[in-house]
Image: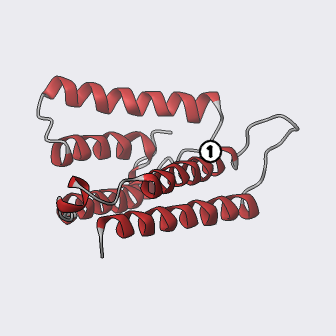
Amino acid sequence: MTDLRKDLVLGLVLLAAGAGWSALAWATLSPGFGGGDIGPRAFPLAFGVILMGLSALFIANTLGRDTGGAAAKEGSASILWGPALLLLLEIAVYGALLEKIGFVLATPLLVLAVLGANLKIRGPLTLAAMAAGLTAGCWLVFGKLLGIYLPGGTWVDLG
């Protein structure tokens, strides 16, 4: 399978995933509590629409690409399965940790794991600042400002 065909298939799969995600978000999540309020449906639906838009741009770029010349002679790009599987494992562990230790403890652990293992960032100040900043920022925006439920944890509940 050529790179052009692989990219086209990838774009179509991502477009279908975005459409399916958006349809499920629309059908299963409540729209909100008031006429103009942002409810639980807003962010998942927005992510699905963004995925569909980016997929459409990717497909258009793929179809408009020159199929001859140097691009066809480069060969196929290999998929880096190690980092992809590591990220999948980290997200699965994060989901399990959310239930047990809650958002406030699980989120900085995930940030540290991704920064250290995937991005190879080793500076202690950078690691601490990113973990604390992303956790506090998400907690303030989603938990306090938007009032979205963030799990407290069954083992440890820091709210």
Q: Amino acid at mark 1?
A: Phe
**Outermost residue toward the right in this view:** 35
Q: Where residue 98 sits in the image (x, y, percent)? A: 43, 53
Q: Quadrant of residue 62?
A: bottom left
Q: Is residue 36 above or below residue 48?
A: above
Q: Is residue 154 visible?
A: no
Provide the residue designation for mark 1: 43
- Of residues 101 and 95, the one drawn nearer to the viewer in this rendering: 95
Q: Is label 1 in a helix, a strand or a loop?
A: helix
Q: Where residue 48 sits in the image (x, y, percent)? A: 59, 53
Query: Residue at the location (48% across, 33% down)?
Result: 138
- Of residues 107 and 12, the one drawn nearer to the viewer in this rendering: 12
Q: Where residue 23 sits in the image (x, y, percent)? A: 69, 63
- Of residues 133 and 151, the one drawn nearer to the viewer in this rendering: 133
Query: Residue at the location (73% across, 38% down)?
Result: 38
Q: Quadrant of residue 71?
A: bottom left
Query: Residue at the location (63% across, 62% down)?
Result: 19
